Image (cartoon, rainbow, N blue to C red):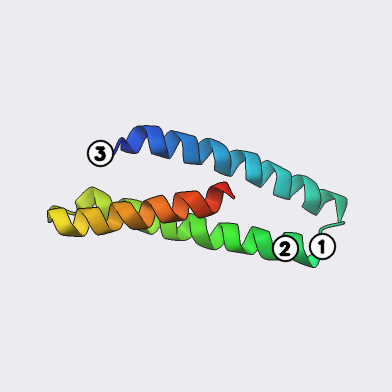
Amino acid sequence: MGWDGDDVAGKMEELFEQQQAAADARANRGTSSVEERARSAKFESLRLSRSRIMTQLANATNPPHRAMLESALNTINDQMAE
């Protein structure tokens, strides 16, 4: 199974923008609940982890290390999509 970084990055960027817009709308209303703030914080943490893994993946040359990073990236992508 190949890894199409541009396709994945584009989809995740679109998802991030949608969720960020929703978070901004909630913040502007001033009605965000504790659950919404926790979800937003978790998403931000996942986004930062994803960014770090993408950087490492761009530099990785060892196939087993690349496979591990790709697996971690897929897990993060799945969690962000929830």
Q: Are marks 2 and 1 in contact (CB under 8 Å)?
A: yes
Instruction: From the image, state whether disc 2 or disc 3 is nearer to you.
Output: 3
Instruction: Identify the mark at residue 37; answer none if there is no mark.
Output: 2
Of callouts 1 and 3, the N-terminal one:
3
**Cα–Cα gap, marks 2 and 3:** 36 Å
* Above or below 55: residue 4: above
Q: Nearer the viewer, mark 1 or mark 3?
A: 3
Residue, disc 1: 33
- Identify the residue under disc 3: 1
**Residue at (14% x, 53% y) in the render:** 63
Farthest residue in the left direction? Answer: 62
* Disc 2 + disc 3, Cβ < 8 Å: no
30 left or right of 25 in image: right
Separation of residues labelled 1 and 3 (CA atoms): 41 Å
Residue 67 screen position, x and y as percent: 23, 54
Q: Position of residue 20 (x, y in %)?
A: 64, 46
* Position in image of residue 77 (x %, y %): 46, 49
**Can you name the residue that lies furthest to the front here?**
1
What is the C-alpha distance between the residues marked 2 and 1?
Answer: 6 Å
> Amino acid under label 1?
Ser
Residue drawn at (69%, 65%) of the image:
38
| Towards the viewer: 76 or 37 | 76
Q: Residues within 10 Å of mark 3 (few under 14, many from 20)?
A: few
- Dividing the picture into quadrants, the one containing residue 52 is bottom left
Asked if residue 12 is positioned above or below residue 56 in the image, the reply reads above
User: Which element type, helix, strand or loop, lies under badge 2?
Assistant: helix
Left or right of 18? Residue 64 is left
Say whether disc 2 or disc 3 marks the residue closer to the N-terminus: 3
Q: How many marks?
A: 3
Answer with left or right where residue 73 lies relative to residue 2.
Answer: right
In the image, what residue type sits under mark 3? Answer: Met
Residue at the spot 66% in from the left edge and 58% down from the top edge: 40
